[in-house]
Image (cartoon, grey):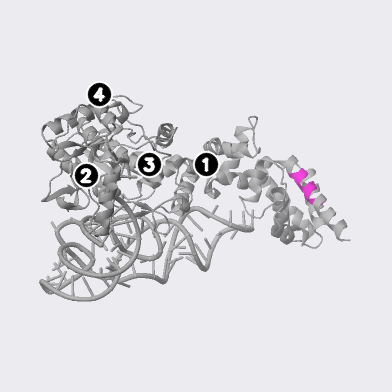
Amino acid sequence: MMEDVRVRFAPSPTGFPHVGNIRTALFNYLFARNRNGVFILRIEDTDRERLVNGSEKAIERALSLLEIRPDEGYGAGGDFGPYRQSERIGIYEKIAAEMIEKKTAYVCDCSEERLDKIRARLREEKKNPMYDRFCRDKNLPYEGVESLKAWGRVVRFASPFEGETSYEDFLRGKVRFGNETMDDMVLIKKDGFPTYNFANVVDDHFMKISHVLRGDEFISSTPKHVLLYRSLNWKEPLFVHLPVILGSDKKRLSKRHGSVSIEDYEKMGILPEAMFNFLSLLGWSPGNNEEILSREEIISKFSLEGLSTSPAVFDIKKLEWINSVYISKMTGEKIFSRAKVFLCEKKLVGEDTDVKYAAQVFELLKTRLPKLSDSVERAGYFFKDPWAYDDGAWKKSFSGVEEIEYYVESLKNAIAHDEPVTKDDFEALLRKTAENLGIKTSVLIHALRVSITGVSAGPGLFEICEVIGKERILKRLENALKKYKNEISQSQ
RNA sequence: CACCCGUUAGUGUAAGUGGUUAACACAUCGGCCUUUCAAGCCGAAGAGUACGGGUUCGAGUCCCGUACGGGUGACCA
């Protein structure tokens, strides 16, 4: 029998989402889709001090960029709301009351100074800094979060002194912790907001979360959650701790490794669908070494069994490769529509640009475009006459060749007096001209290429000619000749 | 310091409950193709599974230890 899958992504709005967070969201989403379950977005905004304005929007944008749509929760609605923790204070308040009633929680009025002193002392004695449970048996009264705020008191969990707490991690098996290593954690802070440990458990329970897929930095706090579930007599979800994502130097992925924000990759010209594919492979494998998978394939093949436990390295080279595969599979027109923004930015194209023409351009470029942003460099000359010539290419194929001026003039005249349209027309014409001049065709080919593109690499020359057309070719040959003559006169 | 997690070619992953010469892809190198650069096709090199012990007829797969990397030890999440 298959149980109903309800999973959640629960970010805190303390900044812009990082690829690691998005990968967690993605895996939750994939699991939900695969099992016909529900993917929930919950905002964990209980830390009022670290709130960063605009982060909720940033989270939504990052998710929608990859089309990871919540079925329920923040921004999607549902029967278990509200989905922003700051709007659920009453729920935590009530559960805390029940726990105090049952003596599994208590009010504590220890000052921060006292706590600091205890911790400092324990550290000196080389022991784990833990709360000494000073208020555990004081039976201080609890009258809701308002009174907590007024008195500067907190609610703590009455954690067992001894014994062992273990849980079954789906990926790592049985993980056990000695209870003596866990202190009486704070459940509700003196500002009336719950702590992560508490709110997380309460919400997962009421939202009927079946599986918790989260980063493995939470392994250590899981026994605390388990203790909470058990003391409340709630069924705990299945825990699945995902491996961390490392940078290329095997250190935790951070800003030093370039970008960690998903939007920056979009700005670099990485397609969201390529990112989706890449991210899904960070810690998961379909089991048969396949790497280029469509969204639908990933969803249908996703399973918890395919997850790995060892850290995944964020390899930007691999990302670019996947991206280039996606680009080369698209039509020229589609590529242009995605690359347009990059070209517009450099004023290479505008609203009036002929889409048919641009589509032809990208049809030629599709196998040479690792990133959309590369189109500025690779497609520029299709939209604007070369404004600079690559030094090496210019010398090697143009100015460094004996009699080049005469050859190029001849080629120009041949083109001018004919009506070449197709790539075959251009090729035949050029070969004939070379024959008449008694030189190798490659001499003209290279000179023509530099003249019309400014560089030595790119699509087939005659295909470029067909797209660019006779008039512009003539103009560019003229420009190249001008530059050449200029050089000659200056060197004399 | 304590407690946890991890460690298969440069990189990402594969190798059902231990069973032949550890597989695939990216990257690298070489060849073919070609006017160039890619793409594509063909091929090569690259790990004996962090290290050391053990269990076993047999271990990447199980056990123990060590090293290295990481996480947690908050009135952060």
Residue A79's label in the rendered image is 4
Image: magenta residue range = A473-481
Q: Quadrant of the C terminus of chain A?
A: bottom right
Image x and y of residue B3, in percent: 20, 57
A40 versus A248 height, above or below: above
Q: Earlier in the sequence, mark 1 or mark 3?
A: 3
Label number found at residue A22: 3
| Secondary element at tag 2 | strand
Q: CA distance from mark 1 to mark 3?
A: 17 Å
Protein chain holding label 1:
A
What kind of element bears circle 3? Answer: helix
Please state which amino acid type lies under the numbered disc 1: Lys
Residue A441 in sight from this viewpoint: no
The reply to whether callout 4 and callout 3 are in contact (CB within 8 Å) is: no
Dominant SS of magenta comes to helix
Disc with the residue nearer the chain's start (4 vs 3): 3
Label 4 element class:
loop
Q: Amino acid at mark 2?
A: Phe
